[in-house]
Image (cartoon, rainbow, N blue to C red):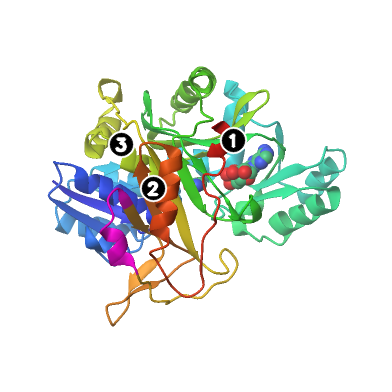
Amino acid sequence: MKVLLIGGGGREHAIAAAIKKSKRVDKLYCAPGNAGIGEIAECVPIGVMEFDRLIAFAKEKEIDLAVCSQDDPLVGGIVDAFEEAGIRIFGTRKNAAIIEGSKAFSKNLMKKYGIPTAAYETFTDANEAMEYLKTAKMPIVLKADGLALGKGVLICQDLQEALDGVREIMLDKKFGSAGNELVIEEFMTGREVSALAFVDGKNYKLMSSSQDHKRAGDGDTGLNTGGMGTFSPSPFYTPEIDRICRETIYQKTVDAMAAEGRPFKGVLYFGLMLTKDGPRVVEYNTRFGDPETQVVLPRMETDIIDVMDACIDGTLDQTELVFSDNAAVCVVIASGGYPVSYEKGKIITGLEKLAAEKDVFCFHAGTKTDADGNVVTSGGRVLGVTALAPDLKAARARAYEAAKLIHFDKMYMRSDIGKAIDEKA
Ligand code: AMP
Ligand code: GLY
């Protein structure tokens, strides 16, 4: 069959690698893709929001299955557009992608259906939000309602910071219309775990757990980023935690969406915090996580096309999802200065050496091939180096060893991805 993958980041490279492993796929296209994806798929220069051009391309090439796992196109209705055009697509329809597209929606859903999450209030008026803050306990969390490239969350230590935050989000519109509505929520503490599930509208199948490292600097310091590295499985996601989450969160969310007339199909990402009062939902995403996918999919043994088919057809309950009994660590190599300002166009060396390593994957995020045929940097997060090993410690050592083979001017990576594993040892 012929598959069209939509997107061009590290997550898409990992999805492309999983699709390439499928015995059922003869041809893989990726729009727009990147330099790494270009080695295993044919890249097509069409943007993820150009639905009409994507559909025309899919028709011309007689695509059997399109796959999209990126927030903007999903929230913007790419699945609905493909379905209307009669093209089979794996992803979440617009009316269900709102679970990520609107934080006010997801918080209200959790409240209505009794799914554990931080206490909160929503506001459309900045003055009312500021009045509320004057009586609230600090620290406190402000969240712009809409999509804000993962940057619409402010953790405020005191009242002044919180008032400034309301001003930025609601009045200065730092995140655009995403700030028309504001969620103010209780600050929670605990370890974070990412739990990703395939969902077919009624049933879910959980993938192996993982943990992201969102802050730019070692020891979880510095600014929030798209994610500086991951490991899977999370040793903190114990069988007991899994049991509680299955009972109080996962099926309840799937059922709640169906009851709201918004059946969820695709990948549902549960961002969890393991608080002293039990696991709580920090956020939902309507897609694979990035860079969680880079450690989860290399460990998946089941043919991803079979699982995607089952999600579309509503037969996930008859599908087995199998993960290897091993571990993976992904270290993100970024451009110096990320996430604030950084240079692009730096020549990357060492890629061939890395390609020769066994059980190591180099997922490209922000790369492209320049006019001279060099692979150069084209974004903040440049590469994700994933290593597979029998256990987490070995995977971490291997990932860092492999990352050392790469070089480009001003490259930066955290040195403590997966360090938390030691606490569990
Ligand atoms: P989100 O974009 O919702 O994933 O939020 C980004 C990050 O902010 C999360 O991964 C958490 O580390 C942090 N965060 C969000 N909400 C809360 C909360 N209520 N309490 C503490 N930290 C939070
Ligand atoms: N790694 C966090 C996310 O994908 O939202």
N-terminal of the pair, mark 2 or mark 3, is 2
Q: What residue type is labelled 1?
A: Glu
Q: Is residue 248 left or right of residue 21?
A: right
In the depicted view, which residue is nearer to us: 131 or 306? 306
Numbered badge on residue 294: 2
Q: In which quadrant of this rendering is ligand 1 seen?
A: top right
- Residue bearing mark 1: 423
| Mark 1 closeness class: few <14, some 14–19, many ≥20 residues within 10 Å | few
N-terminal of the pair, mark 1 or mark 2, is 2
Residues in magenta, as a range: 350-360
Q: In this view, does 47 lie to the left or right of 291?
A: left
* Residue 291 appears in the figure: no
N-terminal of the pair, mark 3 or mark 1, is 3
In the depicted view, which residue is nearer to us: 44 or 262? 44
Asked if labels 3 and 2 touch by Cβ distance under 8 angstroms, the answer is no
Q: Which amino acid does label 2 sit on?
A: Gln
Residue 82: x and y, percent? 28, 48
- 297 inside magenta stretch: no
Q: Which amino acid does label 3 sit on?
A: Met
